[in-house]
Image: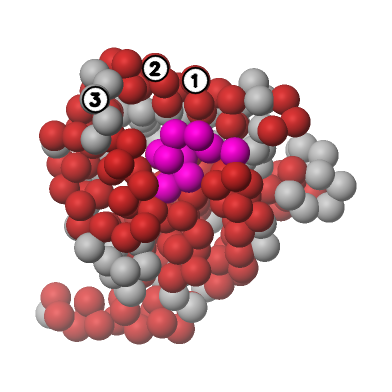
Amino acid sequence: MTLAPPVPGPLLPVPAPAAGAGELAPLCAWLAEVFIAPPTAPGIGAYRRGQAAAWLESLAALPDFARGAAAMRQTLAEEDSDEALAARLGTAFNRLFLGFGGRRTVVPCESAWQGSGRLYQAPAAEMQHLLARADLSLGAGCVEPPDHISVELALLSFLLMSGDPGTDAMKERLQGWIPAFCARCLEEDTTGFWGGAARLLAAAVAACPARNEARQDRLTEERKAR
């Protein structure tokens, strides 16, 4: 099975997340998309006028996610054209996450936040092992290391959906570095978009159910389907 990299553009037309694993899994998958690349002009259009606009609106109605969604929506409500806003967010993304910000770069890889802080260290090797354990691999077009935030979120989404017993360990892994990553995003972001996404990410990781809860959610859904 291949864990293909999320594709930026018009976003996922999925229902708003709630407490159960079935709703948090698409939220994690969407956040993986948000942090892999800046939105394109068509993606901005989807956020403003398409299904992604309804997705953000539904998130804004949930207390845990309201503040983050509101920040993203405020940026999207600015008067820039879709193309102009996409260009501005692309510049911000490069500065925040790709090293253009120098020492103010917020590196989106676990290795940068654990141990020595050097990239491609133990977390990357551990994530490679976890992907193999789940019979997953990075898509051919993915140039990011296996401990990139989007890869970790995509794996968590997969584990939540499948009710895998490794869900708890993956949740704890993210909780070990995501709070610091999100705090730095809030400090360094000047657009509101990435800071809002960081708030949503922190809330999503905090809301991920424990393994037994996820399993119970899955069993409940299976009973309903009978």
Q: Are marks 2 and 3 in contact (CB under 8 Å)?
A: no
Between residue 216 and residue 1, name the one nearer to us: 216
Density class for disc 2 (Cα within 10 Å; few <14, some 14-19, many ≥20) is some
- Find out whether residue 190 is within the magenta segment: yes
Query: Residues in magenta?
Result: 188-197
In the image, residue 126 sits, relative to residue 47, either above or below, namely below
> Which residue lies under the disc numbered 1?
91
Kind of residue at disc 2: Ala
Quadrant of the image containing the N terminus: top left
Q: Gap in Å between the C-alphas at discs 2 and 1?
A: 6 Å
**Residue that carries the numbered disc 2 in the rendered image:** 87
In contact (CB < 8 Å): disc 2 and disc 1: yes
Residue most toward the right?
A: 116
Residue 53 is drawn in which quadrant? top left
Does residue 176 appear to the left or right of 170 in the view shown? right
> What is the x, y in percent for residue 137?
54, 41
Q: Which residue is mark 3?
A: 79
Residue drawn at point x = 40 percent, y = 76 percent? 214
Would you identify the image quadrant in which residue 99 lies?
Answer: top right
Viewer-closest of 196 and 159? 196
Residue furthest out toward the front: 79
